[in-house]
Amino acid sequence: MPRPRLLSALLATAFVASALVQAASCALETEGSKPTQTTKPCESAANCDDGSSCTVDTCSDEKICVYTPVADGPNPAQTVGDCQRIDCAAGQEVTVTDDADIPDDNEPCTNDACQGGTPSNTHTPDGGVCQRGNESGTCQDGVCQISCDAQNPCDDGNACTDDFCNFATSTCIFTNLDGQPTPGATQNPGDCKQKLCVNGKDTDVTDDTDVPVDVNTCTDDVCTNGVPSNPPTTSGTPCTPEDTDVCDGASNCVQCTEAVHCIGIIAEDECTKAACMNHTCVKSYMGTDTLASPALQTAGNCKKIVCDGNGGTTEFPDDTDKPNDNNACTTDSCSGSNPTSMPVAQGTACGMNQVCNSTGSCVGCNTAADCQGTDDFCKKRTCTNNVCGFDYTESNTPLPNGQTEDDCKRLVCDGAGNTVTVADSSDPKVDGNECTQDTCNGTTPSNPNQPAGTMCNQSGGDVCNTAGQCKKSNGKSCAAGGDCASTFCIDAVCCSTNCNGTCRACNLAGSLGTCSPVPKGQEDAPSCTGASSCDGSNNGNSACKKDDGQGCGGANECVSNFCVDGRCCVSACNTTCQACNVTGSEGSCVNIPAGQPDVSASMTCDNGSVCNGSGVCKKSNGTTCGAASDCLSNFCVDGKCCENACTGTCKSCGIAGSEGMCVNIASGQEDNNASMTCTGTKSCDGSGGCKTDNGASCSMGTDCLSTFCVDSVCCNNACTGTCQACNVSGNAGTCSNIPPGNEDTFPMNACVGVNQSCDGMGECKGKLGASCVDGAADCLSGFCADGVCCENACGATCMQCNASGSCVAVPQFSEDNSPMNACVGTKSCDGTTAGNGACKLDNMQPCNGDGECASGNCHSSGECRP
């Protein structure tokens, strides 16, 4: 049998273990096996596991993972018996065919072999002699069959097989144990191995969790593909979590390996630092180039405090430690170790807009040029007693330069040194336009428009408009609205209004420049021409109206003042089935053609009625009727005016959605027409035919509306499922499950005979005593015991199900070897009905009373007897 995949990664052969030792020792170096150093950080080798058995994973002193390929050759982790070998090549895994890696199934009656990398276990010829331990037998179907009974139990001497005697066949069953610890085997702690049963054989399997513990906190306890080792812990690792000591990388626990480990052990300051020497924390003194603590320094005293090389301090001159008297008018410096402050040059800037004097003081000014600002016509700077000031020009004095003409303004001094702007009405802006005024509005030039109608003589105009432009007055010829003071150029003259209404004009004789109505009967091009003309009204509502026959929406649109059926008409045309919009006679009142409705609001011929062409209203097809004379078609069928007599079978003129049309009655509906009966057990088929309903008798599928004739009745489907029928009582015509206990005699789904019947759920099940291969699911009773369908679970001790399906007692002195009710070995059944004590002691076994013995006789010698 194939070995579970869970174990495939664990198993290794003896030569694989040897390869692991070589790889772990790092003593061998083959071509292409140089270590690969990565940038992956680590604390120990456990952080570097790349999942490949073709590399040795380590953590360097620099805390970087290093992967060293093992020697080229067989991979340390092999799968035994798969006819393949995984080799390592430059640290990579390569799979090759290995026909020497045969698949041993621990069965003497098979030939275990590899062919081209494919494993096989072919059976040896039946009848051959075979051996399992001390037990001999014969081969049968690839299994060594060994006889057994209660006095000759099965034992092949292999701890990795489960030995069992099948008393029903009197043959041994040896089940290979796979994946569990070998019974009775002694495990060796820390050897990176575990003894497991693998396909029935005791095997040493790699177990990298069985690490070798050496009780040294500065070594790692590891297994590498089954090889134990205790490599040193990385240098600098704490010996224990609560300890300040660290490992030195050579398996020793020391005080330090670098200075950082001595922090807190050695007291430090600027002149004394902690150091690590020979794994011991010591003091290291700083030299004279190291400044002492800032707290010991005095700013601005031209001196510095430095370390003296012995852990103490000393003082030296420092010309960079200058004094600061906070006076911008002095220069601070050091003379040796003495601070000094000398005046800077007079006039040097200082403070806020100030300068230095010759004695080192910060003052407002030495001369007027030192003062902020500039001199101009309205002010000049002064310096009096080192204080800046101004001399101002008299108020309202005009500036000699910088004045702007025509801006209504004048620039003057304000007496405080500032230039200000004042109003000057004598300086307006002149624009040269006769239709505007030239004025000043305070300091703002203004040119407001002259009143509209003011006479002018510019640009061909004679009157000013509201926009301050000289334009033409009403009645003057023009080319565009921009020529006119009114802005309206209508009919080539300036007009008083826009005058854009239909049948209105501005160039009529006697009223030039005034918008007036066009006389009645005349056209107004381009909007009132052809079949339209003006009505000549002079009430402000003059309009263009339509001639007879033109489309209209109301009488006020028509010259005749009659709008009928959407057309201007010669008369009111209010007679039934007459209209003014008949094609070819638009505008004339004539009879409406046959078949068309009269939709006039005043003439009722609606609700499905139409005209007959002679001025009479009749009903159209599909409309409810009582007699043929009601209908335009002269046919009243099924209560509806119809297109024809509609006398065929399963035909109707009253079908919803098709009223008035003679169509087929829908499938499943009856035809209850007195002359064409299709009712009762029959219905229409939707194609004009009458068919039999489901559940009624039939001889073939064409008789049925459903097209299925099953079990001599019309059925809702083909009903071909196992244990289904269409003639089940109370459900005829519907495909239903055959009731439990009945047979299915349909040829395709035969469920008949002494051992089969339907279960009422559409399944064919075995009767009592029938064999059951898949368990209770095969049985009508729902119980499968001892390979037959049984009347109950029959699971009690010393009970069995006989060939009739009855649960009966196991014969006296026979064993019950079912797994749940084992009564084997020194015990057997007493032949009574199941219950406590049905499994009793065999003859010659020690006993304390008759009730303990299968024979019912506990001899005075203290053992069961016949």
Image (cartoon, rainbow, N blue to C red):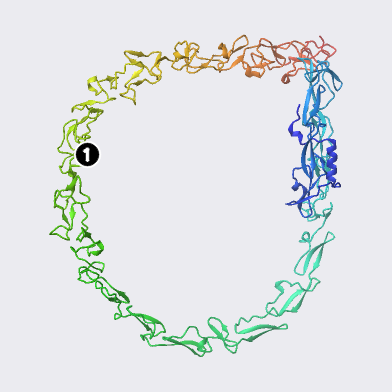
Image height check: is 642 above or below 400? Answer: above
**Residue located at (57% from left, 15% from top):** 759
Which quadrant would residue 669 be assigned to in this image?
A: top left
Count numbered badges in the picture: 1
Q: Amino acid at mark 1?
A: Gly
Provide the residue designation for mark 1. Answer: 566
Q: Is residue 532 left or right of residue 312?
A: left
Q: Is residue 627 left or right of residue 322?
A: left
Which quadrant would residue 129 be assigned to in this image?
A: top right
Position of the N terminus, as image quadrant, is: top right
Residue 776 position in % (x across, y down): 64, 18
Position of the C terminus, as image quadrant, is: top right
Q: Is residue 732 visible?
A: no
Nearer-the-camera pick, 497 or 299 = 497
Residue ranking furthest to the left: 510
Say which element carries label 1. loop
Q: Is residue 296 left or right of residue 590?
A: right
Nearer-the-camera pick, 448 or 739 = 448
